[in-house]
Image (tube, rainbow, N blue to C red):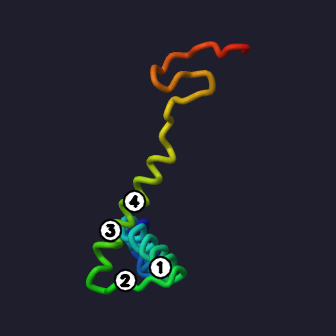
Amino acid sequence: MATDDAGAAALAADPAAAVDSAAAVRSAAEAEFDALTGRLGIDVPADLKGGVLAGYRGLRDMAALLRGVDTGHRPGRDPRTGNDEERPGA
């Protein structure tokens, strides 16, 4: 069981390695949110920060999903019907 002891020793030596990945994502989003609000001069009240931060994370996640969506629109394709049509003069 030397590998278990080595893993435990590594976690004891580096407590950051024991941080849950979801917690790391939350703290990164919070740091980004703090930087953005600080740059813009926005003061978010402490009692509202949790809700505002949750909304910010949701919007960030939706924006990332939308950036990855393929709408299927291509030049020469009719977006209303989805039919590929020859363009005049093509």
Q: Amino acid at mark 1?
A: Thr
The C terminus lies in quadrant: top right
Residue flagged by tag 4: what amino acid is it? Leu
Q: Quadrant of the N terminus?
A: bottom left
Q: Which residue is mark 4?
A: 59
Q: Which mark is residue 44?
A: 2
- Which of pointers 3 and 2 indicates the residue nearer the eye? 2
Q: Which mark is residue 12?
A: none
Distance from label 4 to label 1 (Cα)? 15 Å
**Marked residue nearer the N-terminal end (1 or 3):** 1
N-terminal label among 2 and 4 = 2
Q: Residues within 10 Å of mark 1 (few under 14, many from 20)?
A: few
Residue at the limit of the structure toward the right, as seen here: 89
| Along the line of sight, the residue nearer the viewer: 84 or 11 | 84
Residue furthest left as drawn: 47
Residue 47 lies, in percent from the top left, at 26, 84
